[in-house]
Image (spheres, grey):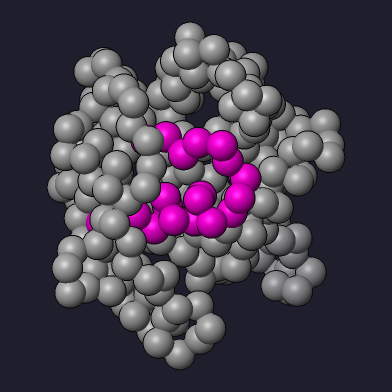
């Protein structure tokens, strides 16, 4: 085994076949290509990885991933592919698999299969941050669109209650920025994945991405919003869709 096979970072893309709210979302066509193809492209284009591996329980997802240029050397167990399986448990399984194959990557990145706005430079920035600091995890995050300190809930009688009433009179510009997970990637050392350590803790930091590139696709509405956003941005900005690769149907872009 060569040095790069032993030491270079590895990417794992969890992509089970049984999504319920958006059926088959990992291989559903997004702007003419299987959704997972966009994540595979970004990972390969980043130059960070020796291997880009898809962790799936599904033969169709596996076949599509192979056509899109990723590896898919195993099918994960059924107990890690149901609605209760966590990203942490899936990644721990993937790292144990890599170790059993004789691989010892210095870092491992989890990349979500539904991240069409992920950019290679963000992955590279995450790796550099992980390797330069004391962090166990480095992930993509973005700012909340509105100040969360002004948030309120609806009560049973239809009235509202502020969650932080002491912030009622605070000016928006005086409130600290609050961030949330961008649902794109998570860098970590192998031991952090094996420990299934909490990602959002004091030993973590993040790479900030703009709000327009953060779309967590969990519902049909999320999907439609992402398609509208891609259609608009890719037609008017310098962020054009990547050319079709092996996973693109003939005649599509």
The reply to whether the magenta stretch includes residue 94 is no
Count of picture labels: 0
Q: Can residue 238 be seen in the rendering of this structure?
A: yes
Q: Quadrant of residue 171?
A: bottom right
Q: Which residues are magenta?
A: 34-54
Q: Position of residue 166 (x, y in %)?
A: 70, 56
Quadrant containing the N terminus is top right
Q: In screen coordinates, is 87 left or right of 10?
A: left
Nearer to me, 174 or 16: 16
Q: Can residue 164 be seen in the rendering of this structure?
A: no
Q: Residue at x 18, y 63 (%)?
A: 249
Q: Position of residue 227 (x, y in %)?
A: 30, 71
Quadrant containing the C terminus is bottom left
Nearer to me, 188 or 157: 188
Nearer to me, 77 or 221: 77
Residue farthest top in this picture: 100
Nearer to me, 252 or 134: 252
Q: Position of residue 148 (x, y in %)?
A: 59, 59
Q: In screen coordinates, is 178 left or right of 15?
A: right
Residue farthest front in this picture: 2
Q: Position of residue 111 (x, y in %)?
A: 48, 43
Q: Residue at x 29, y 57 (%)?
A: 246
The reply to whether the magenta stretch includes residue 37 is yes
Q: In screen coordinates, is 2 left or right of 87?
A: right
């Amino acid at each position: 085994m060569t040095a790069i096979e032993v030491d270079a970072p590895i990417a794992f893309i969890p992509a089970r076949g049984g999504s319920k709210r958006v059926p088959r979302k990992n291989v559903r066509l997004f702007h003419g290509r299987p959704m997972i193809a966009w994540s595979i492209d970004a990972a390969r284009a980043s130059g960070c990885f020796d291997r880009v591996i898809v962790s799936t329980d599904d033969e169709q997802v596996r076949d599509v991933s192979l056509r899109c240029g990723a590896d898919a050397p195993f099918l994960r167990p059924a107990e890690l592919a149901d609605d209760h399986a966590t990203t942490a448990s899936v990644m721990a399984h993937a790292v144990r698999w890599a170790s059993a194959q004789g691989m010892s990557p210095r870092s491992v990145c989890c990349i979500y299969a539904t991240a069409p706005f992920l950019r290679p430079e963000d992955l590279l920035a995450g790796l550099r941050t992980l390797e330069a600091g004391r962090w166990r995890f480095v992930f993509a995050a973005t700012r909340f669109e509105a100040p969360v300190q002004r948030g309120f809930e609806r009560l049973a009688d239809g009235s509202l209650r502020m969650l932080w009433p002491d912030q009622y009179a605070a000016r928006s510009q005086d409130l600290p920025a609050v961030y949330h997970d961008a649902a794109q990637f998570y860098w970590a050392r192998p031991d952090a994945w094996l420990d299934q350590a909490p990602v959002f803790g004091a030993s973590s930091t993040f790479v900030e991405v703009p709000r327009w590139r953060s779309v967590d696709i969990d519902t049909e509405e999320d999907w439609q919003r992402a398609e509208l956003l891609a259609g608009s941005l890719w037609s008017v900005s310098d962020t054009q869709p990547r050319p079709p690769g092996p996973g693109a149907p003939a005649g599509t872009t």
